[in-house]
Structures are given as C-alpha cells and as structure tokens.
Image: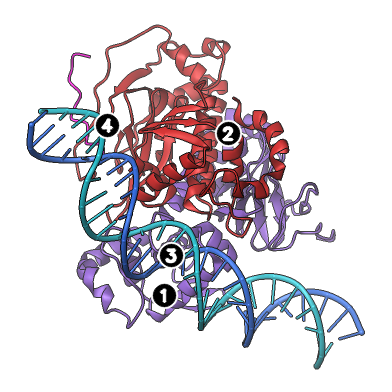
Chain colours: A red, B purple, C blue, D cyan
Amino acid sequence: MMTPVLAPFESSVRVDRPAVHRSHRAPAAERGRLRDLVALLGLGDEALQTIDPSISVALWHVYQGGGLLLEGELATTLYVVRTGSLKSMKTLEDGYEQVLSLALPGELLGSEALHEGHQPATVVALQDTTVHALPLCELRQLCLQCPVLDRALQRALSRQLVRAAEVTAMNAAVSSDVRLARFLLWLSARMADIGQSSHRILLRLGRRDIASLLCVAHETVSRGFTTLAEAGYLAIDRKEVEILDMARLRQFSRCTRGGPQESAHGTRGVEVARCVAATAWDASLETALTTD
Amino acid sequence: MMTPVLAPFESSVRVDRPAVHRSHRAPAAERGRLRDLVALLGLGDEALQTIDPSISVALWHVYQGGGLLLEGELATTLYVVRTGSLKSMKTLEDGYEQVLSLALPGELLGSEALHEGHQPATVVALQDTTVHALPLCELRQLCLQCPVLDRALQRALSRQLVRAAEVTAMNAAVSSDVRLARFLLWLSARMADIGQSSHRILLRLGRRDIASLLCVAHETVSRGFTTLAEAGYLAIDRKEVEILDMARLRQFSRCTRGGPQESAHGTRGVEVARCVAATAWDASLETALTTD
DNA sequence: CGGTCTCTTGAGACGGGTCAAATGCGGTGG
DNA sequence: CCACCGCATTTGACCCGTCTCAAGAGACCG
C-alpha cells in the first residue's frame, strides 16, 4: 500500500492504444485467501481439502477509477471480485462507451476472454476494490485437481450469462422511466444477494453510466429519477437511493409498450391504480423475488 | 421420423403455463456422432480418444416453431446446436416477448441453467434443426475424463458471453436504422463464421423478432429495411437479404448519438460522404473484420 | 477559491411509437 | 384447384417521448 497507484485512468476514460493501466499487486498475503475465494464461488471448506495449497492466488487491489482489464489485452488471468464493484464497458468504433455490466462480489471477470484469447471489454473499478487473480495456467490445474471447483466455475460462467440476459431484458422496449425502475429493482436484488440492503442503495455508477447501460441519454436518467421520486416510489439524494415503496415500484416496472401504459407523472398513485389490482398477489411474491 | 412432431407451438407463440412442447427424439444413431459433437466444440479427433465411447449423446430434431427449452423448466441437459438455428427469448411479466439471442451451429443452449438449476429463457427453433443433447450427469463425467473437452466447454460458455455483449453493443444508443445495420453486419459475420455466405442471408427471424432484439417497434424494422435498401446498401426481398455494399453499410453502422450523425435518407451516398473519408482505412480493415 | 466535473432543469425539434389500413403470402378446407 | 382466413409485412398519418442543445447549480479537487 506504499506503492502509489499507477495512474488510474480518469473516470470517463477514452481508452487509447497502449498503456497497461494496472493497479499494483497488494502485499497482503493472508492464510485464508484460498478459503475466501472458494467461499465466493459458493463452495464450502470441504472443497478446500482437494486443492493444492501451493497454488498461488494473488489478491489485487484496484482503486476507484483504476482499470483491471483493458479491451484487446491478452487474456492471462481470471478474476473473482472479492469486495467493491466494477463496470465493464466496450468502446465502440465511434468512441461511444457502452457499459455492458456491473460486477459485484463473487462475480467473474475476464471470462469472456477464454474464447478468442483477448479481452473484449474494458473493466474499471467503481470504488476501491479487491479481486482474486487466478492465472489461467493455474486455473487449469485447479480444475483438474478439484472437479468441484471446476463445476463452480461453470456455474459462475452461467451466472454471468444470466446477468447479461437480465441487462437485455431491462432494456426491453419500454419507456425510459420504466427502464430506470427495472434497473433499480435489478440492482436492489443484486445488493440483497450479496447481503446488503435492498432498500438503501449507494449508486456506484454515475448518471452517464446508468444512461449507457439503459441506452438512453444521461439527461433522461436524471429526469427519470426525479419522476420516480415525485411518484413517491423512492427518495434520491445524489448517489444515494432509498426505495420507499418496493411493491409499487415493481408494479410500475412491469409496464411495456403495448401493455397498459403507466405514467409516473402527476399525483402519485392515481394512474397507477389502473393495473395495481394485482398488488396483493404482488406482495405475496415479493419475498420470494427480492430475498429481502 | 415416423413419429409425428409433438404439437410445435406456433411461430409467434405466447408461452403459457404447462405443456412440455418437445420435439421427439430422432431415431438416427450414427457412429460419428461423438466426433461431430467434438468438432462442433472446436476440437480435433485426438480429443475423441480420451472419451468413453459408451457415453450417450442423443441427437434431437426440433422442427420449425418447435420448442427446445421452456422457461422455468428444470435443467437436465445441455445442448449443442448441430444444424439450423434457434432463438432464445424471455417472456416478461407483462407478456412481452424479449428475444435475447440467436443460436447457430456450434453454440451452446441451456447453459444459463447451470446456475440456479432452471431455464431462464425459452428456446424455439427458427427452422428444422438438430442438436446434440448432453445430459448434465454425463457431461460431468465427460469433463472429468477429458480435460480438453472441459476446456472446450469453458470456451463455449465464454463465447456465449461474448455473443450477449455483442447484442448489447448492437443496441447501444443510436438511431433505429443504425441498429438495424449493426444487426445485419453482426448476422453477416456470424454466417461467415459457420461457413455460409456473408452477403446473401436468409433471415430466419421475422420482423417482429428482429424488432424485439433491437428494442424497437416492428414497423420501425420494416421501415429501416426500406431505408437501407433505398440507400443502396442492400437489397431485400421478404426474408432474403443481399448486402450490396458492405463497406458503406459498415461505415453507416458506426454512427452513434453524439458522434457525426448519418442519415440513410435521401440520395444515396451524399450525406454518407461526410464521414466516409476513412473508407480507405476501412477497406483495409474489412478483410480482418469480416472473414469474408 | 477558481476550474472542472456531474447532475439538474428547461425549451424545442425530431425520431420513432402507436394506430390504422392495404397488401401479399402461406396454409387450410371445401 | 380455388376460395378463404390468418398472419406477417409494408406504408401512411399523427403525436408523444426522448434526444439535443443550453444554461445553471452543486460537488470535488487542487
């Protein structure tokens, strides 16, 4: 932690040719690191027994705004997020930054590079973050030694696929306000998954990044927050969101084009009533869906 | 092939509760089936040696409009597309059908269910299609026996992730015409990958499905085709597309909001000229990019 | 304390959604 | 073989939602 962080690229970075912007390796070398990794992959201590303890699993620190992966880079390592959060994004030919996903603890990074051998996306930390680094060659050994871990890896890959599908579903053709509501519910569920509050959320993504993820202009996101807040679904202060009425927010998020359209405008609750008949049913599902 | 196909659901199906619409198992039982599967995963015959030949890999036929996976279904099997094509889609709470991806030969289906254990999406054949079916329990044995295959599976999973990211990038915030152009280029590249013409393409997806994939109204897709055709980029007849000017189509596809906007309207080539200065450079990259 | 950033809010224009109707193809049954 | 029906596709007209441009208020940083 003495070593200064290598120039993390600015938050709204335009990734240029070279420069392996990379945060330094942290000195930390705890004993339970492997155990920690194994737990993140959803396995118990018993899996630990079958693993060669000489395997080196480095712990990396990536500071806010720092890059972990750079588009085009050769794939040498797979990462598992331990703490913090990161965004992955693709810089399109025209220079537009398309945010692809949000990585929270327990998730895999760099797995898209197994195919083709180079990173298809850039990954940047949204806050100070730690990741376990598994060199691919060691990973192969691990998979051979420990079939349980091999399967855990498959499951983790599968989860990434599910996440990607969720993002696509979020962007299903609907109004921007509904998209934003879906985003918040999605985030809320994921926070719950990692044991954090699903009601009070600190947005790590800026408006611009959220906008990119939802494929809208950033002003639209801003207005959307205002609208949802005025409707009483949530309170927002800068990057802090508090979901005040989960059930109604979820109700609102169901609207699609073609279906009964809901507007969050106007006196709260009035026009929402139209399709809220299902709210009781809704509430019964809520616990199942949110893991509150 | 004597057995009649179990009621395939109609092409524009709304998946309701029950009914395991499932096409029947085909009688075919060729010798080289395993070899075929292994080849689809990008492995050579040498991998075949390490595999227990008693492993049962069934070949399934799914007829046009027939379902292979049903949302919510328990995960028991992984499929590898052998011939044909399928779409995977999610039925959102409001009944809207969101198309998530297009599966072509060599791709994995059902892999999203490794996590959570049940299918998160429905998969329907767009034409008569054959898939290799690997029961999960046997798959595990295979992975143990044959590390090469295990890694091939990881790569295949990784590829699915890349595909998902591509879809997201396609939908990056741009005009609907540009989105359509990107879709066509994407499809063109994938057709090339599987050894088919990248210039003449038979669309297996209907306008409605394309619209869903691109998150626009189906009328907009229709108009988009007309626009691109009038601009001279392509010719379209019903479901047959012929890309007439790949370079200019690609050029057009680069436009994003914020960047220099291009309109395909009006006399072809006029307004395109503005940012076509790079066309020479473009052409040099083309071969690298398209695998024509 | 200024510079630079993000975020918010407003005003106006335009793209694309919605509704509607015409066309054409494919499949079905007489 | 033909008439009929349903569905996909196309095209037009209209209007709302969202993008764009612009300005101003806060934050954060040096």
Is disc 1 in the same subunit as disc 2?
A: no
Q: Do the numbered discs 2 and 4 sit on residues whose CB atoms are within 8 Å?
A: no
Crowd class of label 1 (few under 14; some 14 to 19; many from 20; radius 10 Å): many
Q: Give the range drawn in magenta.
A: A1-13
The answer to which quarter of the image holds residue D2 is bottom right
Tell me the crowding category of disc 3: few under 14, some 14 to 19, or many 20 or more residues within 10 angstroms, Cα based. Answer: some
Q: Find disc 4 in the rendering and name its residue.
A: A65
Could you tell me which secondary element the residue under label 4 belongs to? loop
Q: Residue at x 72, y 52 (%)?
A: B15
Residue A146, numbered circle: none
Instruction: Report if the CB atoms under discs 1 and 2 are less than 8 Å apart.
Output: no
- Quadrant in the picture for residue A11: top left
**Of tags 4 and 1, which is closer to the observer?**
4
Q: Do the residues labelled 3 and 2 touch (CB within 8 Å)?
A: no
Q: Which chain carries label 1?
A: B
The answer to whether residue A123 shows anywhere in this view is yes
Residue B228, label in figure: 1
Q: Sequence-wise, which precedes: disc 2 or disc 4? A: 4
Between marks 3 and 2, how big is the CA–CA gap? 33 Å
Q: Position of residue A125 (x, y in %)?
A: 32, 30
**What residue did someone put label 3 on?**
B176
Residue A175 place in picture, x, y as percent: 50, 54
Q: Quadrant of the C terminus of chain B?
A: bottom left
**Residue B145 lies within the magenta run:** no
- Say which of B19 and A182 sits in front: A182
Residue drawn at the location 76% of the way across and 59% of the way down:
B8
Amino acid type, mark 3 = Ser
Amino acid type, callout 1: Leu
Q: Is residue A92 left or right of residue A201?
A: left
Circle 4 crowding by C-alpha within 10 Å: few under 14, some 14–19, many from 20: many
How far across and how far down the image is residue B11, in percent? 69, 63
Q: Which of marks 1 and 3 is in front?
A: 3
